[in-house]
Amino acid sequence: MEKFIVCLEDTLKNTTRAEFRDYILHTVAPAVMKHNPGNCKLTLSAAEQPSLTILPLRRNGFAMFSLAGIDRAALLSELERHRNPDRPVYGYAVHESPYLLSGRSWPCGTESPGLVLVTMFRKKPGLPEEEFMRIWFGEHSPLSIVIHPLINYIRNVVTGTLTDNAPEFDGIVEEHFGSDRDLLNPVRMFGGIRRVLPSMLRIWRHVPTFLDMSNIRNYVCREYSIKGGLAACNEEMRDDRFVRDRGAVSA
């Protein structure tokens, strides 16, 4: 599925995560929905954050809208109203490629159970594009769902930028854990007390084979499937082969 991802961040200079969450849910999301997107999913930084982690977590306010069937110019014009020096807005065109989809038992339009780990990354410098995609889709995706207790695993391949200020990323992954503890507790996240250390080692040996370790961002989030047929609301078949043609998206 081709879609747009638009992100808003907050530096926490003026607001807490809870205040940022309320602002996004009650002000920004309704403004986006005025433009009647065909699909809308919001991933929003959670108040709960792990006290112990090996991940390069960012703990500032973060919101990610995943949208399809919406006018790009109208969307960016709307979100521009919410930009300020402490709250950048940036966006991407992406190809959504679900790898793991569990049956959804909660109503579309409500908060999804559990937590979502959002990871934004660049490919390893010098790694050919085809090799990057092969390792990401063919090796790391199956490894992730074997090690982590995931209910959804969504890959977003960046195919272009929507804004001039967008940080350069090649992929955005959404790893959906069915309960808070499955993500916040490292032992549960990595498969249990007997598997935690070898599983951590497997992941951290594999990640540097295809990612730029100096350009990874992680956010612990809640997910809100607001409208339509994005991965959290449908049964789209997974797409294990995709070749991107990158570039800026024309207006």
Image: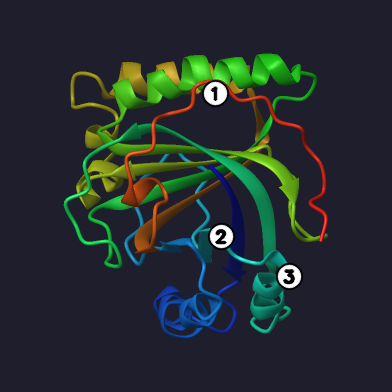
Q: Position of residue 232 (x, y in %)?
A: 34, 49
The image shows residue 168, relative to residue 134, as above or below, that is below
Mark 2 Cα shell of 10 Å, populated few (<14), some (14-19), many (≥20): some
Callout 2–callout 1 Cβ contact below 8 Å: no
Can you tell which mark lies on residue 69?
2
- Residue of label 1: 207
Is 201 on the left or on the right of 10, as rendered? left
Of discs 3 and 1, which sits in the foreground? 3
Q: Secondary structure at mark 3?
A: helix
Residue depicted at x 56% and y 20%: 241
Can you tell which mark lies on residue 73?
3
Residue depicted at x 61% and y 61%: 6
Q: Secondary structure at mark 2?
A: loop
**Badge 2 or badge 1: first in the primary sequence:** 2
The image shows residue 17, relative to residue 67, as above or below, that is below
Q: Position of residue 79 (x, y in %)?
A: 64, 76
Kindly identify the amino acid type of the residue bearing the numbered disc 2.
Gly
Residue depicted at x 67% and y 49%: 93
Q: Quadrant of the C terminus?
A: bottom right
Kindly identify the amino acid type of the residue bearing the numbered disc 3.
Ala
Callout 3–callout 1 Cβ contact below 8 Å: no
Residue depicted at x 33% and y 26%: 145
Mark 1 Cα shell of 10 Å, populated few (<14), some (14-19), many (≥20): some
Q: Position of residue 107 (x, y in %)?
A: 21, 61
Can you tell which mark lies on residue 51?
none
